[in-house]
Image (cartoon, rainbow, N blue to C red):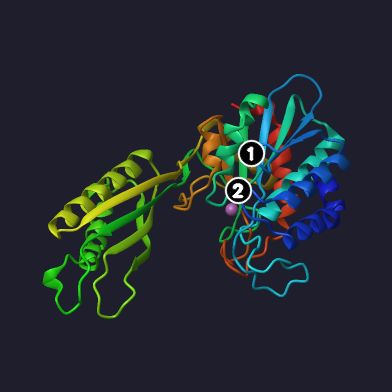
């Protein structure tokens, strides 16, 4: 039976998996029931696995027929602290948590691919199914690597896949180079001398300094970064004061830097510190910047991206494959894996327009057989990898 027929025949069963995962969303590093579910399905399929790689991560290994490469396929499994606002019969059973990024679907697409491949074994070498926890800002990929993912489970190439609203259903977007931005987070703390608001000359106003910093930082992207290098600096929180007629002692400003090159991210961070220092000095207040590097840039290896596009092109035709799209300024911790092993990260279009991380988001179940076929295609056609 071909992969397509198998996936069509078993679609209802696979869709039930996805909906069952959707009902029990779990947050970063707390995906215990999700891991239980994955392991139960792998056990039914007869695929050996190891639990607890990077906390709640699971790595399963399936041997093919004869010698060949070891290919890693990765799905993220965590949910978000977002209250689901849908009336779906299978909506989240946990108030304040939902699968608003479709990782329930990612988990299912990989399980569906494993389900077929465990029966067909129509490939050489071996496949490692990597079920990764904590993709959402907590760096589960890094934790898996720190705990020996690529040391204990050697891999020749690793691939990632994310469902993507705004792209036509099933269209696969993959290209060489940077596809998702780096993510740095910062906290600026300004300290001054608090006084009565009617007598500001007796103190040092942190709020006026904060305003000057917020304005001046807008020049980083326009004046300090090469205009051809996409970079974003955004403020997300400003905290100061509690009383109507008092100038506060402290102001905290939080935000994030996103960039498609490590150099731009570094320049933006450096300029942020310089601007903060200079303006605080001019205002007679003290300022400090705590900068945290969360995720690096997600960079696709050219050969792996070309191979992934070829596989998708043969499945769905070149018109359904996008090799010339714009990178996203959002971030993805699959970047850590691509820093260790060559591979590529692709988007698969949902054909819907509810954005990711929206309370009304629901993974499009029609993608389950499509994503699974892509995974299977990557494994079965490896002898055509450049
Ligand atoms: Ni996601």
Residue holding disc 1: 54
- Choose top left, top right, bottom left or bottom right for residue 287: bottom left
Label 1 vs label 2: CA separation? 9 Å
Mark 2 and mark 1 in contact (Cβ < 8 Å)?
Answer: yes
- In the rendered image, the quadrant that contains the C terminus is top right
Residue at the left extreme of this rendering: 201
Q: Residue 259 carries which label?
A: none
Q: Nearer the viewer, residue 64 or 289?
A: 289
- Rendering coords of residue 383 (x, y %): 68, 25
* Crowd band around label 2 with a 10 angstrom C-alpha radius: few (<14), some (14–19), many (20+): many
User: Is residue 47 among what the camera can see?
Assistant: yes
Give the residue at x 61% y 32%: 147
Asked if residue 274 lies left or right of residue 18, the reply is left
* Residue 134 badge: 2
* Mark 1 Cα shell of 10 Å, populated few (<14), some (14-19), many (≥20): many
Q: Tell me the quarter of the picture where residue 96 sits.
A: bottom right
Q: Is 65 left, or right, of 141 in this rendering?
A: right
Instruction: Compare residues 103 and 226 and report the one nearer the observer.
Output: 103
Q: Residue furthest top?
A: 67
| Quarter of the image with the N terminus in it | top right
User: Can you say whether 294 is above or below 72 in the image?
Assistant: below
> Mark 1 or mark 2: which comes first in sequence?
1
Q: Residue 145 or 102: which is nearer the viewer? A: 145
Q: Where is residue 100 in the image (x, y as percent from the top left)?
A: 62, 62
Instruction: Kindly identify the residue that appears in the image at 79 percent across and 47 percent down.
Output: 36
| Element marked by disc 2 | loop
Q: In which quarter of the image is residue 314?
A: top right
Q: Is mark 1 on a helix, strand or loop?
A: loop
- Whether disc 1's CB lies below 8 Å from ligand 1 is answered no
Judging depth in this view, the residue of 248 and 159 nearest the camera is 248
* Residue 336 % position (x, y): 52, 37
């Amino acid at each position: 039976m071909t992969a397509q027929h198998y996936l069509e025949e078993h679609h209802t069963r696979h869709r039930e998996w996805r909906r069952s995962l959707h009902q029990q969303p779990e947050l970063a590093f707390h995906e215990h029931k999700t891991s239980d579910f994955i392991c139960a399905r792998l056990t039914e399929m007869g695929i050996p696995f190891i639990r607890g790689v990077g906390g709640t991560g699971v790595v399963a290994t399936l041997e093919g027929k004869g010698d060949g490469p070891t290919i890693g396929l990765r799905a993220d499994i965590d949910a978000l602290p977002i209250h689901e606002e849908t009336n779906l019969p299978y909506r989240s059973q946990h108030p304040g948590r939902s699968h608003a990024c479709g990782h329930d679907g990612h988990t299912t697409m990989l399980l569906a691919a494993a389900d077929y491949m465990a029966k067909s074994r129509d490939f050489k070498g071996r496949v490692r199914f990597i079920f990764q926890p904590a993709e959402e800002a907590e760096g589960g990929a890094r934790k898996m690597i720190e705990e020996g993912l690529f040391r204990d489970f050697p891999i020749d190439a690793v691939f990632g896949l994310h469902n993507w609203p705004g792209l036509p259903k099933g269209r696969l977007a993959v290209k060489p180079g940077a596809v998702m931005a780096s993510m740095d987070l910062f906290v600026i703390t300004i300290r001054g001398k608090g006084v009565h608001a009617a007598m500001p000359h007796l103190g040092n106003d942190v709020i006026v300094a904060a305003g000057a910093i917020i304005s001046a930082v807008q020049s980083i992207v326009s004046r300090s970064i090469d205009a051809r290098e996409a970079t974003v600096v955004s403020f997300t929180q400003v905290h100061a004061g509690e009383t109507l007629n008092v100038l506060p002692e402290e102001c905290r400003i939080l935000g994030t830097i996103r960039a498609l090159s490590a150099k731009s991210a570094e320049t933006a961070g450096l300029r942020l510190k310089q601007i903060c220092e200079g303006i605080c000095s001019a205002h007679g207040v003290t300022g400090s910047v705590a900068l945290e590097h969360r995720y690096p840039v997600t960079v696709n290896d050219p050969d792996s991206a070309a191979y992934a596009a070829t596989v998708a092109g043969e499945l769905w035709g070149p018109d359904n494959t996008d090799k010339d799209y714009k990178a996203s300024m959002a971030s993805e911790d699959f970047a850590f894996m691509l820093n260790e092993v060559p591979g590529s990260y692709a988007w698969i279009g949902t054909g819907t327009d509810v954005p990711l991380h929206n309370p009304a988001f629901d993974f499009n179940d029609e993608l389950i057989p499509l994503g699974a076929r892509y995974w299977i295609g990557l494994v079965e056609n490896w002898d055509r990898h450049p």
